[in-house]
Image: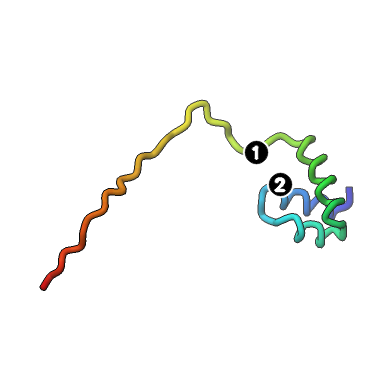
Amino acid sequence: MRIETREAMEMLFCAKWNLPKAAKHCRLSRKEMMITFSEYCALHEPTYNKFETEIQLQLDYEQKGTQDPT
């Protein structure tokens, strides 16, 4: 894999670039980039942590009226 293509794949994989920017960087068409990136994703493990338990945060949306100082 060319250096430009590897850089583009890494930037796409970590979501720092979008597909058109990465394709332009390594001089590939949009379709070629999609196919190449799909193969790249199949060969690399995810970098995020999967949590066993999900955390649900409760937000207090109670609306308080504004008081008129007059």
Image coordinates of residue 6 in percent, x first then y, are 81, 50
Disc 1 + disc 2, Cβ < 8 Å? yes
Q: Quadrant of residue 19?
A: bottom right
In the picture of the structure, the residue carrying the numbered disc 1 is: 47
Quadrant of the drawing holding the C terminus: bottom left
Q: Residues within 10 Å of mark 1 (few under 14, many from 20)?
A: few
Image coordinates of residue 24 in percent, x first then y, are 81, 62
Between 58 and 67, the one nearer to me in the picture: 67
Report the residue at 82% width, 40% height from top. Answer: 39
Sooner in the amino-acid sequence: mark 1 or mark 2: 2
Separation of residues labelled 1 and 2 (CA atoms): 9 Å
Q: Quadrant of residue 29?
A: bottom right
Report the residue at 75% width, 61% height from top. Answer: 21
In the picture of the structure, the residue carrying the numbered disc 2 is: 13
Q: Quadrant of residue 59?
A: top left
Report the residue at 71% width, 34% height from top. Answer: 45
Say whether residue 13 is left or right of residue 51: right
* 61, above or below 44, in the image: below
In the rendered view, how is the structure colored? rainbow
Between 61 and 17, the one nearer to me in the picture: 61
Say whether residue 10 is left or right of residue 33: left
Q: Secondary structure at mark 2?
A: helix
Residue most extreme to the bottom: 70
Say whether residue 3 is left or right of residue 63: right
- Please name the amino acid that badge 2 sits on: Phe
Residue most extreme to the top: 52
How many badges with numbers are in the image? Answer: 2
Image coordinates of residue 14 in percent, x first then y, are 67, 48
